[in-house]
Image (cartoon, rainbow, N blue to C red):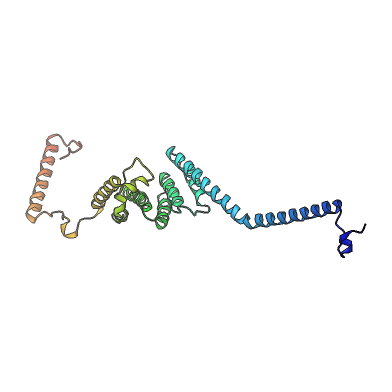
Amino acid sequence: MTDLSARAGGTPSDSPEDLRASAAAALLASNRRRRRIRRWIAIGTLPLTLAALLFVGKILSMYAFAHQSITAYVADDYAGSEASARGQEFLNWFEPFKAPFNVGTALAGAEKLPDARAKLEESLDLATGLEVCTVRINLALVLERMGDAARAEGDGAGAAEFYGDALTITTEMPEECNSDEAQEQSSDPDRDVQQSREDLEDRLKQKQQNEQPPPEEEQEQEPQPSDEKLEELEDKLEQGTQERDQQQGDDGGGSGTDKPW
Protein backbone atom coordinates (compact mmCIF):
# COMPACT_ATOMS: atom_id res chain seq x y z
CA MET A 1 0.00 0.00 0.00
CA THR A 2 1.33 3.45 -0.93
CA ASP A 3 1.61 6.27 1.68
CA LEU A 4 -0.90 9.02 0.88
CA SER A 5 1.48 11.78 1.88
CA ALA A 6 4.12 10.40 -0.44
CA ARG A 7 1.56 10.10 -3.22
CA ALA A 8 0.47 13.67 -2.66
CA GLY A 9 4.08 14.85 -3.00
CA GLY A 10 4.63 15.50 0.80
CA THR A 11 7.62 14.54 2.94
CA PRO A 12 7.57 11.59 5.21
CA SER A 13 6.67 12.37 8.87
CA ASP A 14 9.57 12.74 11.37
CA SER A 15 10.40 9.85 13.54
CA PRO A 16 9.94 10.08 17.36
CA GLU A 17 13.72 10.35 17.82
CA ASP A 18 13.89 13.33 15.48
CA LEU A 19 11.04 15.04 17.33
CA ARG A 20 12.75 14.56 20.68
CA ALA A 21 16.05 15.91 19.32
CA SER A 22 14.29 18.92 17.85
CA ALA A 23 12.49 19.63 21.14
CA ALA A 24 15.75 19.35 23.11
CA ALA A 25 17.51 21.76 20.73
CA ALA A 26 14.65 24.25 21.05
CA LEU A 27 14.78 23.98 24.84
CA LEU A 28 18.54 24.58 24.89
CA ALA A 29 18.15 27.60 22.62
CA SER A 30 15.41 28.96 24.84
CA ASN A 31 17.55 28.48 27.95
CA ARG A 32 20.45 30.28 26.28
CA ARG A 33 18.19 33.18 25.41
CA ARG A 34 16.91 33.38 29.01
CA ARG A 35 20.47 33.32 30.38
CA ARG A 36 21.49 36.11 28.02
CA ILE A 37 18.46 38.17 29.09
CA ARG A 38 19.19 37.61 32.78
CA ARG A 39 22.84 38.54 32.24
CA TRP A 40 21.98 41.81 30.53
CA ILE A 41 19.39 42.59 33.19
CA ALA A 42 22.03 42.00 35.88
CA ILE A 43 24.51 44.22 34.06
CA GLY A 44 21.90 46.94 33.56
CA THR A 45 20.76 46.94 37.18
CA LEU A 46 24.28 46.69 38.67
CA PRO A 47 24.67 50.47 39.09
CA LEU A 48 21.30 50.67 40.81
CA THR A 49 22.23 47.78 43.10
CA LEU A 50 25.54 49.38 44.03
CA ALA A 51 23.82 52.72 44.62
CA ALA A 52 21.25 51.06 46.89
CA LEU A 53 23.97 49.31 48.88
CA LEU A 54 25.93 52.56 49.18
CA PHE A 55 22.78 54.38 50.29
CA VAL A 56 22.02 51.85 53.01
CA GLY A 57 25.67 51.74 54.11
CA LYS A 58 25.85 55.53 54.32
CA ILE A 59 22.70 55.75 56.45
CA LEU A 60 23.93 53.05 58.82
CA SER A 61 27.38 54.67 59.10
CA MET A 62 25.80 58.08 59.80
CA TYR A 63 23.85 56.71 62.73
CA ALA A 64 26.88 54.77 63.97
CA PHE A 65 29.24 57.76 63.82
CA ALA A 66 26.63 60.09 65.33
CA HIS A 67 26.01 57.68 68.21
CA GLN A 68 29.73 57.29 68.85
CA SER A 69 30.26 61.05 68.74
CA ILE A 70 27.48 61.73 71.23
CA THR A 71 28.57 58.94 73.56
CA ALA A 72 32.18 60.17 73.57
CA TYR A 73 31.08 63.78 74.15
CA VAL A 74 28.96 62.84 77.15
CA ALA A 75 31.97 60.95 78.56
CA ASP A 76 34.13 64.11 78.10
CA ASP A 77 36.16 62.28 75.45
CA TYR A 78 36.24 65.27 73.11
CA ALA A 79 39.02 63.87 70.92
CA GLY A 80 37.01 60.68 70.36
CA SER A 81 33.87 62.70 69.74
CA GLU A 82 35.67 64.80 67.13
CA ALA A 83 37.10 61.71 65.39
CA SER A 84 33.67 60.07 65.17
CA ALA A 85 32.05 63.27 63.92
CA ARG A 86 34.67 63.61 61.18
CA GLY A 87 33.62 60.15 60.00
CA GLN A 88 30.29 61.72 59.03
CA GLU A 89 32.00 64.08 56.59
CA PHE A 90 32.63 61.37 53.95
CA LEU A 91 29.95 61.56 51.23
CA ASN A 92 28.06 64.02 53.40
CA TRP A 93 24.83 64.04 51.39
CA PHE A 94 22.15 63.77 54.07
CA GLU A 95 21.75 66.64 56.54
CA PRO A 96 25.11 68.12 55.46
CA PHE A 97 25.13 70.58 58.39
CA LYS A 98 25.33 67.75 60.93
CA ALA A 99 28.96 66.73 60.36
CA PRO A 100 30.54 70.19 60.84
CA PHE A 101 28.10 70.87 63.69
CA ASN A 102 29.20 67.77 65.60
CA VAL A 103 32.88 68.45 64.86
CA GLY A 104 32.55 72.05 66.02
CA THR A 105 30.75 71.05 69.21
CA ALA A 106 33.48 68.52 70.03
CA LEU A 107 36.20 71.11 69.35
CA ALA A 108 34.43 73.54 71.68
CA GLY A 109 34.42 70.92 74.42
CA ALA A 110 38.19 70.57 73.95
CA GLU A 111 38.55 74.38 74.25
CA LYS A 112 39.75 74.66 70.64
CA LEU A 113 37.53 77.68 70.27
CA PRO A 114 38.78 79.26 66.99
CA ASP A 115 38.53 75.89 65.20
CA ALA A 116 35.11 75.28 66.77
CA ARG A 117 33.92 78.67 65.56
CA ALA A 118 35.05 77.92 61.99
CA LYS A 119 33.24 74.57 61.93
CA LEU A 120 30.03 75.95 63.40
CA GLU A 121 30.04 78.81 60.91
CA GLU A 122 30.43 76.19 58.16
CA SER A 123 27.49 74.28 59.63
CA LEU A 124 25.38 77.45 59.74
CA ASP A 125 26.00 78.03 56.02
CA LEU A 126 24.73 74.50 55.28
CA ALA A 127 21.76 74.53 57.68
CA THR A 128 18.24 75.27 56.48
CA GLY A 129 14.91 75.85 58.21
CA LEU A 130 14.81 74.91 61.87
CA GLU A 131 18.30 73.39 61.63
CA VAL A 132 19.81 76.85 62.16
CA CYS A 133 18.39 77.20 65.69
CA THR A 134 20.73 74.85 67.54
CA VAL A 135 23.67 75.82 65.33
CA ARG A 136 23.22 79.50 66.18
CA ILE A 137 23.02 78.84 69.92
CA ASN A 138 26.20 76.75 69.96
CA LEU A 139 28.04 79.27 67.79
CA ALA A 140 27.00 82.10 70.10
CA LEU A 141 28.16 80.09 73.12
CA VAL A 142 31.57 79.55 71.50
CA LEU A 143 31.86 83.28 70.78
CA GLU A 144 30.90 84.03 74.38
CA ARG A 145 33.67 81.75 75.65
CA MET A 146 36.13 83.39 73.27
CA GLY A 147 35.09 86.72 74.76
CA ASP A 148 35.61 85.36 78.28
CA ALA A 149 39.10 84.19 77.29
CA ALA A 150 39.95 87.61 75.85
CA ARG A 151 38.69 89.32 79.00
CA ALA A 152 40.81 87.01 81.17
CA GLU A 153 43.85 88.09 79.14
CA GLY A 154 43.05 91.74 79.74
CA ASP A 155 41.76 92.42 76.20
CA GLY A 156 38.55 94.24 77.04
CA ALA A 157 38.02 95.58 73.51
CA GLY A 158 38.45 92.11 71.98
CA ALA A 159 36.07 90.63 74.55
CA ALA A 160 33.43 93.25 73.76
CA GLU A 161 33.75 92.45 70.04
CA PHE A 162 33.24 88.72 70.64
CA TYR A 163 30.21 89.42 72.85
CA GLY A 164 28.79 91.69 70.15
CA ASP A 165 29.23 89.03 67.45
CA ALA A 166 27.56 86.44 69.67
CA LEU A 167 24.67 88.80 70.39
CA THR A 168 24.19 89.36 66.66
CA ILE A 169 24.02 85.60 66.11
CA THR A 170 21.22 85.23 68.67
CA THR A 171 19.19 88.32 67.74
CA GLU A 172 19.12 87.23 64.08
CA MET A 173 17.67 83.85 65.02
CA PRO A 174 14.35 83.20 63.21
CA GLU A 175 11.14 83.40 65.20
CA GLU A 176 10.42 79.80 64.21
CA CYS A 177 13.15 78.79 66.66
CA ASN A 178 10.68 79.50 69.48
CA SER A 179 8.28 76.81 68.23
CA ASP A 180 7.69 73.30 69.52
CA GLU A 181 9.05 71.92 66.25
CA ALA A 182 12.38 73.64 66.90
CA GLN A 183 12.49 72.13 70.39
CA GLU A 184 11.90 68.67 68.94
CA GLN A 185 14.83 69.11 66.53
CA SER A 186 17.18 70.39 69.23
CA SER A 187 20.43 68.46 69.62
CA ASP A 188 19.85 68.52 73.39
CA PRO A 189 16.22 67.71 74.28
CA ASP A 190 16.87 68.62 77.92
CA ARG A 191 17.77 72.19 76.95
CA ASP A 192 14.94 74.58 76.17
CA VAL A 193 15.90 76.45 73.01
CA GLN A 194 13.92 79.60 73.75
CA GLN A 195 15.05 79.79 77.39
CA SER A 196 18.67 79.15 76.40
CA ARG A 197 18.45 81.94 73.85
CA GLU A 198 16.99 84.42 76.32
CA ASP A 199 19.51 83.59 79.05
CA LEU A 200 22.37 83.83 76.56
CA GLU A 201 21.22 87.21 75.26
CA ASP A 202 20.92 88.59 78.80
CA ARG A 203 24.44 87.43 79.69
CA LEU A 204 25.92 88.79 76.49
CA LYS A 205 24.31 92.21 76.92
CA GLN A 206 25.58 92.45 80.48
CA LYS A 207 29.10 91.31 79.57
CA GLN A 208 29.29 93.60 76.57
CA GLN A 209 28.15 96.54 78.67
CA ASN A 210 30.76 95.78 81.31
CA GLU A 211 33.55 95.79 78.71
CA GLN A 212 32.49 99.01 76.99
CA PRO A 213 34.65 101.99 78.05
CA PRO A 214 32.64 105.02 79.27
CA PRO A 215 32.39 108.02 76.91
CA GLU A 216 35.18 110.56 77.24
CA GLU A 217 32.86 113.26 78.58
CA GLU A 218 31.71 110.89 81.33
CA GLN A 219 35.16 109.82 82.42
CA GLU A 220 35.86 111.37 85.76
CA GLN A 221 39.07 113.33 85.92
CA GLU A 222 41.10 113.04 89.08
CA PRO A 223 40.64 116.34 90.96
CA GLN A 224 43.77 118.43 91.25
CA PRO A 225 44.48 120.17 94.58
CA SER A 226 44.25 123.94 94.57
CA ASP A 227 47.21 126.24 95.30
CA GLU A 228 45.93 126.89 98.80
CA LYS A 229 45.81 123.16 99.52
CA LEU A 230 49.33 122.72 98.21
CA GLU A 231 50.64 125.50 100.47
CA GLU A 232 48.80 124.01 103.43
CA LEU A 233 50.32 120.57 102.76
CA GLU A 234 53.81 122.07 102.49
CA ASP A 235 53.37 123.87 105.83
CA LYS A 236 52.28 120.62 107.50
CA LEU A 237 55.22 118.72 106.04
CA GLU A 238 57.66 121.38 107.22
CA GLN A 239 56.09 121.45 110.69
CA GLY A 240 56.28 117.66 110.94
CA THR A 241 59.93 117.69 109.96
CA GLN A 242 60.72 120.28 112.65
CA GLU A 243 58.89 118.25 115.32
CA ARG A 244 60.81 115.07 114.39
CA ASP A 245 64.10 116.90 114.52
CA GLN A 246 63.25 118.33 117.92
CA GLN A 247 62.15 114.89 119.22
CA GLN A 248 65.37 113.27 118.00
CA GLY A 249 67.37 115.99 119.79
CA ASP A 250 65.54 115.32 123.03
CA ASP A 251 66.28 111.60 122.72
CA GLY A 252 70.02 112.16 122.35
CA GLY A 253 70.15 112.00 118.56
CA GLY A 254 68.88 108.39 118.25
CA SER A 255 68.52 107.03 114.69
CA GLY A 256 65.22 105.12 115.01
CA THR A 257 62.89 104.36 112.04
CA ASP A 258 60.21 106.98 111.36
CA LYS A 259 56.71 105.86 112.15
CA PRO A 260 54.23 105.87 109.32
CA TRP A 261 51.78 108.69 109.10
Residue 241 as seen in the image, left or right of residue 59:
left
Residue 226 location, quadrant: bottom left
State the residue lying farthest toward the right.
1
Q: Quadrant of the C terminus?
A: top left
Relative to 127, is 63 on the left or the right? right
Q: Is residue 180 visible?
A: yes
Q: Looking at the image, can residue 163 be seen? A: no
x and y percent of residue 161 in the render? 31, 56
Which residue is at the front of the view, 182 or 101? 182
- Up the image or down, 9 lies above or below 38; here it is below
In this view of the protein, which residue sits in the foreground, 147 or 155? Answer: 147
Q: If the image is split into quadrants, where does the N terminus sit?
A: bottom right
Q: In this view of the protein, which residue sits in the foreground, 64 or 75?
A: 64
Where residue 84 appears, as percent x and y from the top left, is: 50, 45
Report the side of 182 relative to 249 (left or right).
Answer: right
Image x and y of residue 149, in percent: 34, 48
Q: Residue furthest top?
A: 251
* 26 vs 67, nearest the viewer: 26
Q: Is residue 116 left or right of residue 255?
A: right
Q: Percent x, y for residue 168? A: 30, 56
Q: How many marks?
A: 0
Residue extending furthest toward the front: 1
Residue at 47% in and 53% down: 94
Q: Is residue 16 above or below residue 11?
A: above
